[in-house]
Image (tube, rainbow, N blue to C red):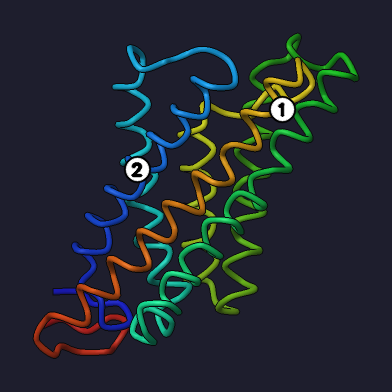
Amino acid sequence: MTYIGGVRLRMAIFVGALAGVGAGLVFATAHAFIIVPIWDRMTGGLVFAAIAGAVGGWSFTELYAERIDAGLGRAAIAGGLYGALLWIAVSPVSAIDFALRKAGVLPRYELLGVAVALLLAAATGSFLGWYRRRSRRGMIAGAAATILLTVAMAGPVPIGRSSRAFGIFLSVLPASIVAGVILGMALHLTVRFRAPFPNSAHDAA
């Protein structure tokens, strides 16, 4: 069985999926206060949030493995930081979308906008992974997390449409931080209260 930083990979994916659902609920609550309630449309959104969270759980263990077993507080802080950095990494996607719409490129060439969004998300995520690990594996982990977060957000947020839309864009930040804190704490507890197992990033047990 595969372990990353002492964390069982399947557990990281499972906990990440739960954290993603938690983030989705935080976002839906913010949407209800800022614009309108969307509880009746959240089923599909929560599925995508769970998938993004699962990938995020794996990515977090790749990029912050040494923080998971460093104490509950440090794991929580690392998780919150990870969530915030993911939001920062995907923010340029909405900014570029705004610029393209101002330039008249969108919505005329919508497929181009989708391609730009995904490529930009991959690029910023790769940079995050490289910054943390200086490795191809870290870059892949970072890119996967930002791409899936962009998909879970249903693409770029139309921040130029209204102040409420910009508020929704900002609400993704606390949702990401909450999910990261849950992820970091939960993964620490799985390491803390399980029997000893390998610390190798790719060992099988």
Write the residue at 37% across / 26% down.
45
Q: CA distance from mark 2 to mark 1?
A: 21 Å
Q: Residues within 10 Å of mark 2 (few under 14, many from 20)?
A: many
Q: In the image, which disc is placed on residue 9? A: none
- Is residue 85 positioned above or below 132 on the image? above
Residue 196, given in percent of the width and then of the height, sits at 13, 90
Write the residue at 45% across / 28% down.
29
Quadrant of the rendered image containing residue 113: top right
Quadrant position of the C terminus in the picture:
bottom left
Residue 139, given in percent of the width and then of the height, sits at 55, 66
Write the residue at 36% across / 14% down.
41
Tell which of 94 and 139 is nearer to you: 94
Tell which of 51 and 126 is nearer to you: 51
**Residue placed under numbered mark 2 in the picture:** 22
Q: Secondary structure at mark 2?
A: helix
Q: In the image, which disc is placed on residue 166? A: 1
Sooner in the amino-acid sequence: mark 2 or mark 1? 2
Tell which of 177 and 123 is nearer to you: 177
